[in-house]
């Protein structure tokens, strides 16, 4: 059976982008067709300035939302990255396999480090090395497929390179994974700045739909989405990025095609209204289940405990094999 691994970083409240670009595919496809592991990658959230109490809270919230969105513990493994030591154990070996030039070429590093510097902050070394930790997350489980949004594809490419290099140097140890991503709404853009991704850690929140936003807030954000002065509904990412983003969100929510949907609208107002309705319809059951799970924290803890136990059992033999292959002496 195919093994799937994917994760979500608790750097903010989960967004519609996280849902349409990742979570929904995990729920609807991956957990049914593969041996799937889904992880709250909390160590990755430490790569930028962070508040310890907030990270802890957001980690629990992310895990709860993953379950609320429909991940079923009987079908998949849900856990928190820092609960399984194998990730950091393997990460160091992969740092000894990667080069610094490779790391500096990562687009997310370039963008996020530039942002940190522009804000007058220093750049944590872990921001540079975190794609290696992500490679460890994936390779520890011999994952075949990694469902991700477009923005993460470069990191999965790096993971493949590191796996191939390690295998060539030290003997076959790792499965070489591949990235898979949904064809519609693989990249949900910010409603106020449709040329940049809807990201959960962005400071300006008016263009971001959070999964836990109240219905009126969602509606307001969608109705105020930036469009253009052309006045015509056409699916054109270059010329009409705001309209294209709305069409992609609507298509992703309803299962249609953005270009076909475009031809059914004569005004931006109607497109926005239908998009808001479709998003609310999609999020309603997630809200309901989230409220139920918040009332039963013991259940979430038990799921995460069992998930970490299974994850450890799966990862340890691969990581031990990597330690042996690279030349480290086993303990007596
Ligand atoms: N806007 C998006 N459109 C489509 N997919 C998205 N993903 C994130 N944003 C969008 C996908 O969600 C999964 C989990 O992402 P992540 O939490 O690991 O990190 P990220 O990609 O860096 O997400 P954010 O929300 O943009 O966080 P910040 O602001 O902290 O950087 C991934 O599969 C991702 O592709």
Image (spheres, rainbow, N blue to C red):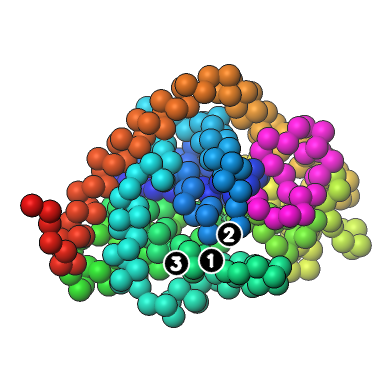
Q: CB at mark 2 closer than 8 A to ligand 1?
A: yes
Q: Which residues are magenta?
A: 200-222
- N-terminal of the pair, mark 1 or mark 3, is 1
Q: Are marks 2 and 3 in contact (CB under 8 Å)?
A: no
Query: How far from the left and from the top, in percent, is residue 111?
Result: 62, 70
Task: Write down the residue under mark 1.
Answer: 124
Report which quarter residue 327 is drawn in. bottom left
Q: Is residue 24 visible?
A: no
Residue labelled 1 has its Cβ within 8 Å of some atom of ligand 1: no
Q: Secondary structure at mark 3?
A: helix
Between discs 2 and 1, the one toward the N terminus: 2
**Residue at (32, 63) in percent of width and height:** 92
Badge 2: residue crowd in 10 Å (few <14, some 14–19, many ≥20): some
Asked if residue 35 lies left or right of residue 244, the reply is left
Disc 2 vs disc 1: Cβ atoms closer than 8 Å?
Answer: yes
> Which element type, helix, strand or loop, lies under badge 1?
loop
Q: Is residue 123 visible?
A: yes
Q: Horizontally, is 126 left or right of 260 in the view?
A: left
Q: Nearer the viewer, residue 267 or 153?
A: 153
């Amino acid at each position: 059976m195919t093994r799937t691994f994917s994760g979500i970083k608790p750097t903010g409240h989960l967004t519609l982008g996280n849902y349409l670009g990742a979570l929904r595919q995990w729920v609807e496809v991956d957990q049914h067709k593969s041996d799937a592991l889904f992880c709250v990658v909390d160590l990755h959230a430490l790569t930028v300035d962070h508040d310890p109490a907030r990270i802890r809270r957001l980690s629990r919230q992310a895990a709860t939302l993953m379950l609320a969105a429909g991940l079923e513990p009987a079908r998949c493994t849900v856990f928190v990255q820092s609960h399984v030591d194998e990730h950091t154990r393997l990460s160091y070996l992969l740092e000894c396999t990667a080069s610094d030039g490779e790391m500096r070429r990562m687009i997310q590093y370039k963008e996020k480090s530039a942002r940190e510097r522009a804000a007058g902050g220093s750049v944590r070394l872990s921001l540079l090395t975190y794609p290696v930790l992500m490679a460890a997350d994936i390779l520890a489980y011999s994952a075949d497929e990694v469902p991700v949004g477009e923005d993460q594809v470069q990191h999965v490419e790096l993971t493949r390179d590191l796996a191939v290099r390690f295998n060539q140097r030290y003997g076959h140890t790792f499965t070489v994974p591949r990235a898979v991503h949904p064809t519609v709404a693989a990249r949900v853009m910010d409603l106020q700045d449709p040329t940049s991704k809807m990201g959960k850690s962005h400071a300006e929140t008016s263009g971001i739909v959070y999964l836990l936003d109240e219905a009126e807030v969602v509606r307001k954000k969608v109705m105020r989405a930036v469009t253009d002065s052309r006045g015509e509904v056409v699916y054109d990412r270059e010329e009409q990025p705001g309209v294209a983003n709305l069409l992609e969100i609507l298509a992703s929510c309803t299962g249609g095609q953005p270009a076909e949907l475009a031809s059914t609208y004569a005004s931006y107002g109607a497109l926005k209204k239908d998009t808001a309705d479709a998003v609310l319809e999609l999020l309603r059951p997630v809200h309901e289940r989230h409220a139920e799970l918040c009332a039963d924290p013991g259940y979430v803890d038990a799921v995460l405990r069992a998930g970490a136990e299974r994850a450890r059992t799966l990862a340890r033999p691969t990581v031990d094999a990597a330690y042996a292959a690279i030349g480290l002496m086993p303990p007596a």
